[in-house]
Amino acid sequence: MKTKYTRKRSSDCKSNKSNDGLTKFMRNPGTITQYMNRIKLVSRRKHIFSYLLCFLLTIPAFSQVTAPTTGPASTGGQTQAPTQSGNTRGTTQGNSQQGVPTNQTNNPQGKTNAQVGNDGNATDGQNAQEGNDQGQNVDDQGKVNRGTTNALSAAEEAKQVLRNKIYGYSIFANKNFNPIPEFQISTPTNYIVGSGDQLNVYLYNYAEATFELLVNRDGFVTIPKVGNVYVAGRTIEEVRKILIDKLARFTPGLIGNGGQTAQTKLMVTLGEVRTIKAYVSGEVINPGSYELTSLSSAFNALYLAGGPNEIGSFRDIRVVRAGKVITHLDIYDFLSNGKIDGDVRLQDNDNVIVGYYLKRVEIDGLVKRPGLFEMKPGETLQDLINYAGGFSDKAYRGRLKIERITSTERRIVDVPEAQYGQFELLTGDLVHVETVLDRFENIVTIEGAVMRPGNYALENSATLKQLVENAQGLREDAFVGRVNVLRTRTDLTIENISLNFADILNGTVPDLILNRLDQVVIPSKFEMAQSAVITVEGEVNNPKITENEGQFAYTSNMTLEDALLLAGGLKESAYASEVEVVRRKRNSPAGAANAQIAEVYKFNVDRDLTLNSNESNFVLFPFDQIIVRKSPNYVEQQSVFLEGEVLVTGPFSIINKNDKISDIINRAGGLTELAYPEGATLLRRTVVTSLQEATDYLAEEASEQSIKEGRIIGDQPNVKEESIGIKLKSILKNPGSFEDLVVQEGDIIRVPKRLETVQVNGAVLYPTTVKYGKGLNFTDYISQSGGFTVSSLRKSSYIKYPNGNIDRTRRFLFFNVYPKVEPGSELFIPQRAAPSLTPQQAIQTTTGILSSVMTLVVTILAFRTIQ
């Protein structure tokens, strides 16, 4: 249906003045042209930035007008969405009033709400506005409904949390607990027979017969030869006596004669029990009527109803029969004793009523069962503690704190332990059971050189001597000349008491009386002396069994052989004939310039760690230093590595100390046909000699690039790899020349394939890699990369050759002489540093920015004037 686009009321136009002005402005092409001309007049400098801001400013305005035209009605696209919302609101509201689901009934009221603009007498503008208002109400109402649903969910969750705290609720929420009576039980003698019950009558002994009697709705059973017998409302035992009286005329021996025992016995049992209807009402979770068996009790009905709710009573549940209360139930009896006094079997139309609780208190803290408990009049705080299972092991029992709510505010009530049995709680009370203090009331502590250090009772260790005796005496290393007692004063400050325990043991001074929290420290002689060690360094097989490698604890009468054995023995490279023991010089003259500070002893040790007879009696002193040097004649195998375009790659051992690069290449069979000797490089591991170099190297080792290189050198501290440029072509042509370097352990010689590219980097228009061309010079490759940039620093250009050598640009008169380019070379063109702004340039830049800002301000003012 087509909707008219109409004017709004004057009041609405005032509230939406800016939107209407914008719509009027954007719908008039002439106005837009006038607006753009005004912008041009204002922006006389015609900065590109100003025009860009003006264009960006007009985009939102065009978007607001053009976007709605894609709707169903070209003139009413902006009104269509609220009309649809109004229709939805009308349907929802009408269906709710009729009490039927909204997806099954069409309500004309929805049409009226949505089309009030077309059917009413008001103007079209009013109708469109009312449609908008109605649609807005739909959105708001929808939000309210969702919020209400969330609020109800939170309320139900809060109720469930409260129920879980109530003592007794868990038994009704327990799915494994089923109090419904079983049918296969012995017939209770006090069971009251009613309509619908089936009675099984058995005659046995002298006469035998069986009857299945159904109690009809009038309460009678029909017995062959006897007729109708009324049994409703009587117990099983009463029915048995009635049947004996009725059947005695037809059954011989059923009644004894002359005081004799009856020869025929009669037994009555229940067959099928009847169904009754009972009601559970009041403050239960699921109130209503329930069909139960006649064996069911009030507690069974209460369980089916879910039990009392969060405000229901667990202590006073009434059973009403024929308008009278016949019994009261207390669920706490079942929870405490396993049975419920007053629980009766229900009859038809009995009503189990659960009222409100009258007094409920809470207990938390260190009890075995914290929660909410319902209290009866006359019950005390001690009863509450019993219901909560009693105190926990670490509970403070001497006094309880109770938070009580008065008519105006809260208050704290302190109850001592002697009044627990007399103190009666009020509803809303919160009982806190706190923990005992985390300290000892009678503790003294002894530490150090005693047999059993630890904590002791002050009563049995009243003095220092008694405490040491209770700790089973002193150790052999105890230093009794100075014993410290750390005493805690009443203000919790620490006092140190030092005394000579030897005098107490001798009886020359009185014993020290201890106080609570005293800490006695008896030092050890070993703790007062420096730990004696020896050090073994050099060519030994140290098994690293000690925390400080090479240091071993000194023992009395330790010999050199013992020390070498602790260090794992000698290495193959050890210089056994010159093993030195360096001993510090004690009591050396102080201040003497030539004072001797150490003594050196030399020994010739066999491989089996034995000395000659004269030296075997040499005993080590504490802090002796044993040095085993490396034999000057011991040299381990060394290797270099060949990679790339050689006939045989891999490791090659260094045969002579003066082996050169040419020797290794010749042993590998020479180069392949594809080898490019001008690009050969030598990688050598060098030791870092400065702190800064070591720091830079460690940072490089941690980088991802170092990991990708594939060679593990991190286990060699302060070692890095360096690339050395070599002229392999010249080396192979003139072996043994000064360019033919002597190889070292770990050297890597790489010979690449012939390279056919040249890489150009730096301040060129297009840094790239180009094909090598014979006869092309440095500037030719720069031209292939687009040429130099304005900021190129040509005179500082340089080249890196494949073998790692660097060559720079030189100057001849006023000309740049560029280096020769080889295949695989890299050209680097540095960039001139950007100059700082001159004062004139800074003023021009600031003026441009201010002009752009002023243009933006004038544009906004012009836009408001047109509105």
Image (spheres, rainbow, N blue to C red):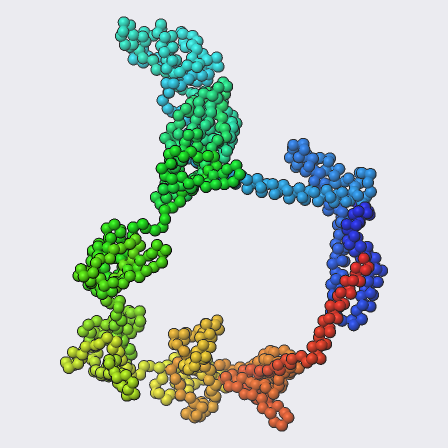
Q: Could you tell me which residue is drawn at 44 percent across and 14 percent down?
A: 232
In the foreground, 797 or 25: 25
Report if residue 325 is visible in the image.
Answer: yes
Q: Quadrant of residue 828?
A: bottom right
Q: Looking at the picture, how far across and down is residue 167, in whole percent?
A: 43, 36
Q: Could you tell me which residue is drawn at 78 percent across and 64 percent down?
A: 859
Farthest residue in the bottom direction?
813
Q: Looking at the picture, how far across and down is residue 538, in whole percent?
A: 29, 79
- The quarter of the image holding the C terminus is bottom right
In the foreground, 146 or 496: 496
Q: Is residue 312 left or right of residue 521?
A: right
Q: Looking at the picture, how far across and down is residue 676, in whole percent?
A: 50, 84
Q: Could you tell me which residue is drawn at 41 percent across and 79 percent down?
A: 719
In the image, is residue 274 above or below residue 456?
Answer: above
In the foreground, 325 or 735: 325
- The quarter of the image holding the N terminus is top right
In the image, is residue 394 above or below residue 28?
Answer: above
Q: Is residue 835 left or right of residue 661?
A: right
Q: Could you tell me which residue is drawn at 46 percent across and 13 percent down?
A: 219
Farthest residue in the right direction?
30
In the image, is residue 151 above or below residue 63?
Answer: above
Report if residue 73 is visible in the image.
Answer: no
Farthest residue in the front direction?
509
Q: Quadrant of residue 844?
A: bottom right
Q: Is residue 590 left or right of residue 437?
A: left
The mark tally for this picture is 0
